Every structure is written in C-alpha cells, then in structure tokens.
C-alpha cells in the first residue's frame, strides 16, 4: 500500500503545484499583467478614520484616510502584514481657504475641504492571490462621478508604494 | 362656559411662561452660569468622518471632525438644528512635514498628522436644556492625557461659535 499512498501524495502535490502556478484561464501572459480594483467598495464613507494629510504641489488636496474593520483592527494592534480583506480608502478634497472661518476668527488661518479633486477616491484592497503581482494589493482610483482611472495611470501606483514595503506598502500611519 | 375656557387657557399660558423662564432648581444665578462637558464621549474615535481641515497660526494643526450617529444623520439629511444627543468631535494633531513621504515622492509636498496638540480633543454636545445658555451646546476640550481645559478657556468657545448661529453654531460642513 505504501507506494500507492506515495503515488497519491505525489499526484496531489503535482496537481497542487500545477493549480498554483497555472492560472485557471490558461493564459499566463494575461494573468501576469497587473489587475486593478474596478468597483468602489460599498459603504467606504462610513468607515473609521485612520488619519489625515495635506499634499501640496500638483495634488493640492486635503485628505482623509479611512479603513474597513480589518484595516482598523490591524492598525490598532500594530499587525503587519495587513490581513486578507483589508481595504484602505483615501478621499481627497481640494485644499481651500475658508473665507467664512477666517472672517469670524479675524485672521487668515483656516483651510478646509472643498470640492473633490480629480483623483477623488483611491483604494488599496488586500487579496494576496488576486493581486500577487503588486504586493498583494489591488489599487483603484475614481473621480467624483465614480469613473475609474485608466490602467496606465493605475500602473503608477505600485512603483511608488513599493518603496514602503517595510510597512506592507502602506504610507499612512494610524494617528490615535 | 366661554369665560371658563378663556380662564383656563390664560392660566395654562401663564404656567407655561413661568415653567419656561424659571429654572427647575430655583437658583436662577447658578443656572444662568455656563456649564461644560466634563467627560470624553465614549467611543468617539470610532465615529464617522464629517470633514478635515488645517489651521495655521498659533494652532498649526491638521484636524478631523467626527460625529456620532445623530450628527452624521443630520448632516447627511441637511437638517438644522441638530437633534438632541448630537455630538461633534474634533481631533487636532500637530501639522508636520513627512520626511518619509517626501523622500519617496522626490519633492517636499506631504504634511501629515503628528503628535496631539495642546487642544487635542474638542466636543460639542447638544442638550437644549442643560446647555440653554450656550445655544443648546455644551463645549469641551481635553489634552492628550484626557485632562479637561479650565472653565476660563471653555468660556471662549461660545462667543466665537455664536457667529455661526445660522448653522446651529457649528463651523464644519460635511464633505461627502
């Protein structure tokens, strides 16, 4: 019986390797290409806050970074890498001086969130298999009308995030 | 019967006016004094995001404004005044340049949330009776150790918020 068991294990192992290395579609080139997130995650605007930031230069935005429950739990526990199913969302609004506030405060000091920027919504979705080519993260960007960015633009996400590999490719730190 | 009905209405009206103008405790001077919120609302860090802002000058912070469910519902429905039980929270972090981000981006453009500021947490709690003297809002401020600001400082809140009475004394607008 031993050789039968050995044979079965061997077959199973080979099958496993084949299943793991060959994409289901049978088009390796296509599968090796980067894949992106194509839909806005449901309910993201209700997620908890990770932190806030202001980007100057061409971006000129003020932004909030939110996370789904998996993201928030991992951040608060300081666990890396982020677990499967983690989604981190970034909302960017135009960075505008608040005339209303400044008038009341009696000094020009207040900058608030204005209309959505061109890169209004961005998401990182953790799925180690689906997005294996980009550190296990799928990237997405949508404008104010929900229109996704084109693939050429999305291909610029990972090369920059790759530099922060030590924190599982995520720039934003949680601020309590 | 008419004069009896008239008398009853008159008595009710006078009783109503008395009930409205005399505080229940019977100590008008004490009741007229401003009262403040003395405890940090439980679970505020899990609340949904209203908006973000940056204050220059002496404050030099970057901030998030969060709201409890009552606040978020009223904001999203555009309802004023805010209902009883509304709590709006403001977290202020030091406004700091991110050397880490700037190095990766190859340009100085990124400002993030640093350590808590001296006025780390602020809250507005809606209770029209308790905080009748200040537009129905109780004000609060806590430092990073949870220590409340002194009364003299809290007395400076309402005079400034009074200028935005048309929006029920709340500066921050909701940004979707």
Image (cartoon, coloured by chain):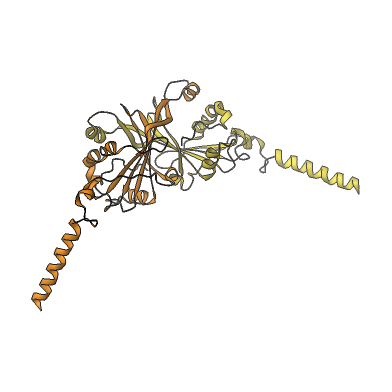
Chain colours: A yellow, B orange
Q: At 44% across and 20% down in the image, what residue appears?
A: B107
Name above or below for residue B70 compared with residue A65: below
Report how many numbered discs are placed on residues in the image. Answer: 0
Q: Position of residue A158 (x, y in %)?
A: 54, 30
Q: Position of residue A107 (x, y in %)?
A: 24, 28
- Where does the image place residue A84, in percent across and percent down from the top left? 59, 42
Q: Say left or right for A84 vs B75.
A: right
Please state which of residues B174 and B61 is positioned toward the viewer in this rendering: B61
Q: Residue furthest bottom?
A: B1
- Observer able to see residue A164: yes
Residue sitting nearer the eye, A1 or B31? B31
x and y percent of residue A20 in the render? 71, 40
Q: Nearer the viewer, residue B108 or A31?
A: B108
Name the side, left or right, on which B30 lies relative to A35: left
**Residue A120, visible in the rendered structure:** no
Work out which residue is located at the far left of the displayed protein and give it: B3
């Amino acid at each position: 019986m031993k050789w039968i068991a050995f044979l079965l294990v061997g077959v199973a192992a080979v099958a496993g390797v084949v299943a793991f290395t060959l994409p289901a579609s049978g088009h390796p080139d296509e599968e090796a290409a980067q894949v992106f997130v194509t839909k806005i995650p449901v309910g993201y605007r209700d997620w908890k806050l990770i932190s806030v930031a202001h980007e100057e230069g061409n971006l000129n935005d003020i932004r909030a970074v939110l996370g789904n429950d998996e993201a928030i739990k991992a951040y608060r526990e300081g666990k890396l890498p982020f677990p499967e199913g983690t989604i981190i969302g970034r909302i960017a609004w135009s960075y505008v001086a608040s005339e209303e506030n400044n008038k009341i405060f009696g000094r020009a000091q207040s900058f608030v969130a204005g209309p959505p920027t061109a890169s209004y919504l961005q998401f990182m979705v953790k799925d180690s298999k689906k997005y294996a080519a980009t550190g296990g993260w799928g990237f997405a960007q949508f404008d104010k009308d929900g229109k996704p960015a084109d693939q050429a633009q999305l291909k610029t996400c990972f090369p920059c995030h790759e530099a922060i590999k030590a924190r599982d490719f995520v720039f934003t730190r949680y601020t309590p």
